[in-house]
Image: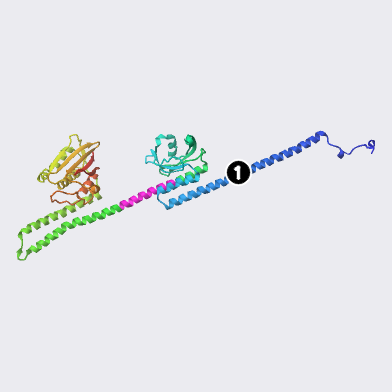
Amino acid sequence: MNLNQVKSIPKWTQLPSPSIFCSEVSMQLGVDTSVAQLQQQVEYLQIQLELERQENIQKIQQIQKFQGLLQHITEHIRDSLDEREILTTITQELVDLLQLNRCQIELYNPCLTAATVTYEYSVSLPHFQGLTTKTADFPQIYQSLLQKQIWQSIEIVPGHDSGLQMMGQLACPIFDHRDVLGNIWLIGRTEAKFGELEISFLQQIANQCAIAIRQSQLYTKTTAQVQEIENREHHHHEFIRHLAQELRTPITNINLAVQTLESIITPAGIVDVEIVSQLLQILHHECGREDKLLNDLLTFAYLKTHPEPPTLITIDFSTWLFPIVESFRDVTNCQQQQLHLDIPPEIPPLSTDITDLEKIMTLLLKQACQCASAGESITVTADLNADTVELKISISGVEIPHHELSQVFQPFYRIPKHSPWQVQNTGLELALVKTMVQRLNGLIHVTSINNRITLIMQFPL
């Protein structure tokens, strides 16, 4: 073809200009770059989603483990009333589940001034069970815990090869609607802090611990009350049994005396005149004994059922006590006993019910005269002790077995006697004394040592 003959070239066959071509190539390369970036972003998001999925799976598995342990603890509390068994199990289960170094439960004293590690489970660290910590020594920690707040920190402890090791620790208070009872301490194996999920779970465990502690306390208290009721029932039955025996004895003697009188009194006359006076004396003695027993019993029952407040009168104690003790001087001289009175002059006036106090002293001095044999001593002393007057009656030559000291003031207990004196003794005297001493807001107890017993009373000034 002759080029000269070609007049024009079609536009669709014309080549683009260099600038337009470069622009189109750049656009194509930009699209490819965007696609690559998008692919990278998609891959990154896929990796992130997979990580989140794995993390969520781990959280779900951890929650399932937490729920399983919580259910196990709840069932344990349902089936057992033994606080020690439950809390010991909790410490061990927490260490195993959370992969801890140590878990311990400390309980406060009633004043909340000290906490003692009562339950502990440790893998490698030293054991601290029984260790008592004063809350005032660590105010920053225990102020938060006593305000029912979580406390968390990093602890530095001795590690392997004489080095130092960082460990995370978490304390969660154990409390209910009434009081703060103690704390659960978790010591981890690394310096990592405990997460929200672990903290929430530990708070639920702390609630279960509070339930276990209160449940055990209630069971212990109920058991003690049941035992006390059983003891009271036992003492009540013993009291009735002893009372029946005491009432039967005079009646039996009276019946024997009456039968003897019937046998010696015949229609022809009295067979043996000399024995009649003896039998009448027996009848008089046993009737008086029965009458005294009934009077003491009525007085004892009245004081128990009608605890009226005493009528207080201020008296000069030493001046008032002297004639009461001296009224027994003739009895002790007749029985060859030594009676001593030692009252210091510095004892201040005493506000008391003089009727009750006089009866107390009279009953105790009668007991002393009955118990002491010839040649023994009866000593009455008084001392000023802080804001009380301590009054003692000491009897030599008599001793009470140690296992019987708690029974001295029970009805119908009789102090062992080594004297030949034949006196009326109902066995209610010491029980009456204790009831009247308590009515005067006083205390009484007995000691027995070195062949001597001492009755000690304390009255408030």
Q: Is residue 265 above or below residue 172?
A: below
Instruction: Decide: few, some or many residues near mark 1? Use Cα within 10 Å; few <14, some 14-19, many ≥20.
Output: few
Identity of the amino acid at label 1? Answer: Leu
Q: Residue at x 9, y 55 (%)?
A: 281
Quarter-of-image position of residue 3: top right
Q: Nearer the viewer, residue 132 or 121?
A: 121
Tell me, yes or no, whether the highlighted magenta stretch contains residue 214. yes
Please, what secondary structure does the residue beneath circle 1 have? Answer: helix
Viewport quadrant of the N terminus = top right
Q: Which residues are magenta?
A: 207-229
Q: Residue at x 7, y 57 (%)?
A: 277
Regarding residue 258, the answer to whether it shows in the image is yes
Q: Is residue 158 above or below residue 448?
A: above
Regarding residue 207, the answer to whether it shows in the image is no
Specify the color scheme. rainbow
Tell me, yes or no, whether the highlighted magenta stretch contains residue 310. no
Quarter-of-image position of residue 178: top left
The x, y position of residue 457, in whole percent, is: 22, 42
Residue with the most extreme bottom position = 267
Magenta stretch, main secondary structure class: helix
The x, y position of residue 271, in whole percent, is: 5, 63
Residue with the most extreme front position = 161
Left or right for 270, reference 66: left
The x, y position of residue 210, in whole percent, is: 43, 46
Q: Residue at x 37, y 50 (%)?
A: 219
Q: Mark 1 highlights which residue?
A: 51
